[in-house]
Amino acid sequence: MSRPGSALIWVWLAVVVFVLDLVTKQMAEAMLNYGQAVKLLPVLDFTLLYNPGAAFSFLADQSGWQRWFFTAISVGVSVMLIVWLRRLPRGQILLPCALALILGGAVGNLFDRLVYGHVVDFISVHWEKSYFPAFNIADSAITIGAVLMALDVLREIKREKKQA
């Protein structure tokens, strides 16, 4: 599957993210009632919600075309990430870790879109009456992956400045 020296070995992390996302969403579906918050901390609830749109419920109020639009984007991004991982040398850590986290999260939400027609969200963070949009493990992995990718870019810029 992977060529010798390829960073494709990091796909294991994407699989772990996918499985963790799938299991936690199934637990949320089994243990929570839709829309009813279960308070964990003063700033954290578990609330089962469905998002037919994208991040922050973007396009959630549309007629259904957005399901297939976001499915196509997820498939395209996932293929691109696998190709990118395959081309990276095996010795790198930060960038392949970032790509694998994003891949696992993208596939987790893709699975929901294909099977349910919406993404299952259940983590709700808030401050008093101001709520951040609900999210899930896949969303968290994508966010952490994006931060790691930004750190890798900054590290590269710093390295190039030293060499110049």
Image: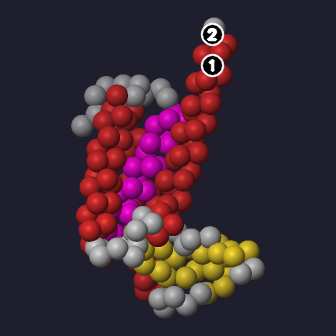
- The reply to whether residue 20 is visible in this rendering is no
Q: Which quarter of the figure is the C terminus placed in?
A: top right
Where is residue 155? Give x, y as percent. Answer: 62, 28
* Stretch in magenta: 93-114
Does 57 appear above or below 161? below
Where is residue 118? Give x, y as percent. Answer: 35, 73
- The reply to whether residue 104 is visible in this rendering is yes
**Is 122 placed left or right of 62 in the picture?**
right
List the residue tagged with mark 2: 163
- What residue lies at 43% left-to-right and 45% top-to-bottom? 100
**Is 46 placed left or right of 8 in the picture?**
right
- The magenta stretch spans residue 110: yes
The label on residue 159 is: 1
Q: Secondary structure at mark 2?
A: helix
- What residue lies at 34% left-to-right and 69% top-to-bottom? 112
Dot 2 amino acid type: Gln
- What residue lies at 48% left-to-right and 91% top-to-bottom? 33
Does 126 appear above or below 39? above
Dot 1 amino acid type: Arg
The residue most toward the front is 62
Front residue of this view, candidates 86 and 128: 128
